[in-house]
Amino acid sequence: MDNFIKKINEVKKKNELDISIMEDLSIGLMNLVSLEEHCFLSYAKTKDEKFLRTLNTTRELRKKLFALIVKKDDESEKWCMSKHFLGASMRLYEVGNRLFHERNEKEAKEMYNDAAELYGLFLELNSGSGNIKIKDNEKKGIFSSMKRLLECCNE
């Protein structure tokens, strides 16, 4: 992780990267993935073709914006993994909101931590760094380091 933070700091010094833009865009992408799911479910419930058209438009926009963050620079499943990291993170965040609203604060915090963990893994996957290692026995995983990284971003 130290290598990753060092690399980010070097890139930031050169003004080549604004993590806050990547963060904002990725949160927008989370919502687009969620919209695609809602369009599908709305179509399944109603059989109204407008939901399929909306799904297609939303999907095309997501693909266009994904290309700004997710580089197809190898033979991996990075593109698909990124979509699933963001989708799962968004869903766990929403479950956390519901639990928090129902006053299940402990469970909500666990969901928020898991959502943040998945989001951190998305950022790691798309950071361009192959030097990040996560210890299997680390309870907080990549999230603690990502939090430190995002706290020091240019605004």
Image: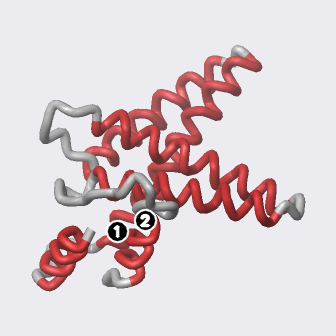
Q: Which residue is mark 1?
A: 21
Residue 79 rendering spot, x and y as whole percentages: 30, 37
Residue 94 rendering spot, x and y as whole percentages: 69, 52
Quick one: quadrant of the C terminus?
A: bottom left
Helix, strand, or loop for circle 1?
A: helix
Please give the label number shown on residue 24.
2
Residue 62 rendering spot, x and y as whole percentages: 40, 41
Q: How many marks?
A: 2
Q: Is residue 85 left or right of residue 44?
A: left
Helix, strand, or loop for circle 2?
A: helix
Is 61 rendered above or below residue 107?
above
Callout 2 crowding tier (Cα within 10 Å): few <14, some 14–19, many ≥20: few
For image coordinates 20% across by 80% down, the residue present is 9
Instruction: Residue at the far right: name it.
Output: 102
Instruction: Residue at the far front: name it.
Output: 137
**Disc 1/disc 2 C-alpha distance (Å):** 5 Å
Contact between marks 1 and 2 (CB within 8 A): the answer is yes
